[in-house]
Amino acid sequence: TNTKATVLGLGAMGAALATALVRAGHATTVWNRTPGKADALVDLGATAAATARDAVAAADVVIACLLDADSVHEVLDPVADVLTGRTLVNVTTTTPDQAKEIAGWAAAHGAVYLDGGIMAVPDMIGLPGASVLYSGSATAFERLRPLMDLWGESAYLGEDAGLASLYDLALLAGMYVMFAGFLHGAAMVADAGVTATEFARRSAPWLAAMTGGFAGFAAVVDGGDYTVPGQQSLVFSDLGDLLGASAAQGISTEVVGVVQDLIRRQVDAGHGEEGFARIYESIRQPA
Ligand code: NDP
C-alpha cells in the first residue's frame, strides 16, 4: 500500500530514511532547512517542499529526523496548527524527558505521537541488523509498521513516549563501556608490541562469545537471589591482577577501576561469596 509520508531533515539519517520510503514506492515529500539536500531524493522520485509548513501539510505521516529536541521545536512550533490531526514520528535523538515533553506538546496540538530511537547508522538502514525502537501511540505503531519496517526491524516498547529513548541510551551504555574496555586492552598490550589491529582480531570474537553470559546474569538479577549456585563469586572476580598489570604497563586504570569499585562495594557489604551479577545492586544504589 502506498502511504503518503513527509520527512523533515535530510541529514545523513533523514536522507537514508526518505530514500527507503521512495524506493519502496511511497509518495514521499521531503524538506530540509538548508536547500539542496533534497536534490538526490527528487531524482529518485520524492517531492521537495519549499517550506516546513508545506511539507507537514503534504502528508498525514510526518517523520522528523532533525538534530536534537531544540531543532524539533524550532521546525515544528511555527507549524503546529497544520500538525493537528496528523501523526508525528520523531526519530530525532532526544533524552527520555525531552521525548515526553515533545509528546505532550504534540498531544496539545492534536497530533498523534510516536517516538523512535534508531539503532543503526545511515548505511545500515533497510539492511539486516538495523532496528528502530518505538514508544508512544500503539495504534500509530501498528498502522505505520509496514512503512517503518522498510528501515529495519521495528520494536514497540510501550505508551510512555520516553521509553524508546531510554532503551536506546541503555543499549548505548553497554556499547560505550565495551568499546572502552576493548581500547583499554589494546593499551595494555601496546608496549608488548601488539598493534591495536591485531588485538582487535582476538578481542572481537572473545567479546562476542562473552555476550552469551548476559542471559545467565539476567536470570540471577530477575530472580533476585545472588546466592544461587554455579555463579562466579565477587571475591573470585576481584580485578586486582588486572589493575596491577595495567599499572605496571604505565597506563590508566580508570576503565577497569570502575568495575573494581562496583565489586568492592558489594564485598565490603559482606556479599563477597555471592555472584558477580550483584554489582547490579551497586549500580542501582549509587555510593
Ligand atoms: P546530520 O548532522 O547529518 O543532519 C542533521 C539534520 O538536522 C540536517 O538535516 C539539519 O539541517 C537538521 N537541523 C539541525 N538543526 C536544525 C534546526 N535548528 N532547524 C532545522 N533543521 C535542523 O545528522 P543525522 O542525519 O546523522 O542525524 C539526525 C538524527 O538522527 C539525530 O538526532 C541523530 O542523533 C539521529 N541518529 C543518527 C544516527 C547516525 O548514525 N547518523 C544513528 C542514530 C540516530 P541542515 O542541513 O539545514 O543543517
Image (cartoon, helix red, strand yellow):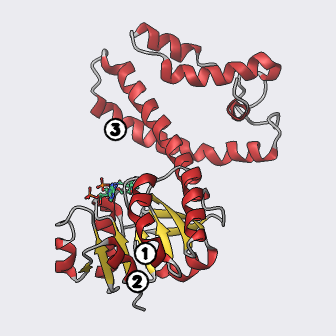
Return the disc, 3 or 2, that comes first in the chain's sequence: 2
Separation of disc 1 and disc 3 at Cα? Answer: 43 Å
The answer to whether mark 1 is within 8 Å of ligand 1 is: no
- Residue at disc 2, secondary structure: loop
Label 2: few (<14), some or many (≥20) within 10 Å? many
In the image, residue 27 above or below residue 179: below
Q: Position of residue 79 (x, y in %)?
A: 42, 71
How far apart are the two marked residues, 1 and 2, measured between alpha carbons?
7 Å
Q: Along the horizontal axis of the image, is 2 left or right of 107?
A: left
Q: Residue at x 43, y 52 (%)?
A: 70
Secondary element under disc 1, as helix, strand or loop, is strand
Q: Amino acid at mark 3?
A: Arg
Is residue 242 found left or right of 121 in the rendered image? right
Quadrant holding the C terminus: top right
Q: Quadrant of residue 190?
A: top left
On the image, the x and y values in percent for residue 136 come to: 61, 67
Residue at screen point 33% across, 86% down = 27
Q: Are marks 3 and 2 in contact (CB under 8 Å)?
A: no
Asked if marks 1 and 2 touch (Cβ < 8 Å), the reply is yes
Is 143 located above or below residue 34 in the figure?
Answer: below
Checking the image for residue 59, the label placed there is 2
- 10 Å crowding of disc 1: few (<14), some (14-19), many (20+): many
Disc 3/disc 2 C-alpha distance (Å): 48 Å
**Residue 236 rendering spot, x and y as whole percentages:** 68, 22
Residue 48, position as x, y percentages in the image? 24, 77
Is residue 237 at all visible to an observer of this figure? no
The residue lying at 66 percent from left, 66 percent from top is 159
Amino acid type for the residue under numbered disc 2: Ala
Quadrant position of ligand 1: bottom left
Q: Which mark is residue 201?
A: 3
- Residue type at mark 1 is Val
Residue assigned mark 1: 62
